[in-house]
Amino acid sequence: MRLKVEEEILEELNLNDALAVERTNLAVERTFLAYFRTSVVFASAGFTIVRLAALGQIEELGYFLLWGAPVILAVGIWRYIAVYRKVKKQYYRLVERIRKSKHK
């Protein structure tokens, strides 16, 4: 759900700029989902290795994977927030530049 301010700003951008912003937002979300998916795979693989007695020889790997899953998820969340803020900052700079050029 978009904010009213974002809708007004998107109306000021030309179609190419608006689509570029949307592509960038989708890429950021897709990257976060890749981190999330990797975290889930690590957690499930680690849990399986730890719980199966037949895989007792690599139990340490299971614990490593279980430990690594939340770390990967935390890195994914941190990167998502950092990149989203950077994109949003550049987005508003672009809008301000467009507004200034319209008023000249």
Image (cartoon, rainbow, N blue to C red):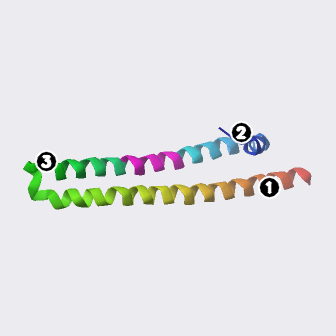
- Classify the position of the N terminus by image quarter: top right
* Separation of marks 1 and 2 at Cα, in angstroms: 16 Å
User: Which residue occupies 45% across, 46% down?
Assistant: 33
* Separation of marks 2 and 3 at Cα, in angstroms: 55 Å
* Residue at the right extreme of this rendering: 104
Q: Earlier in the sequence, mark 1 or mark 3?
A: 3
The secondary element bearing badge 2 is classed as helix
Left or right of residue 52, residue 46 in this image: right
User: Which residue occupies 21% across, 56% down?
Assistant: 62
The secondary element bearing badge 3 is classed as loop
Which residue in the structure is indicated by mark 2? 15
Q: Earlier in the sequence, mark 1 or mark 2?
A: 2
Foreground residue, 67 or 25?
67
Amino acid of disc 3? Leu
User: Which residue occupies 34% across, 55% down?
Assistant: 69
Amino acid of disc 1? Glu
- Classify the position of the C terminus by image quarter: bottom right
How crowded pointer 2 is (Cα within 10 Å; few <14, some 14-19, many 20+) is rated as few
The secondary element bearing badge 1 is classed as helix
Q: Earlier in the sequence, mark 2 or mark 3?
A: 2
User: Which residue occupies 19% across, 59% down?
Assistant: 61
* Residue 42: x %, y % from top left: 29, 52
Which residue in the structure is indicated by mark 1? 96
Q: Is residue 32 magenta?
A: yes
Left or right of residue 90, residue 43 in this image: left
Q: Is residue 101 magenta?
A: no
Q: Is residue 23 above or below residue 88?
A: above
Q: Name which quarter of the figure residue 16 lies in.
A: top right
Which residue in the structure is indicated by mark 3? 52
For the record, the magenta segment spans 28-37
* Residue 29: x %, y % from top left: 52, 46
Left or right of residue 92, residue 66 in this image: left
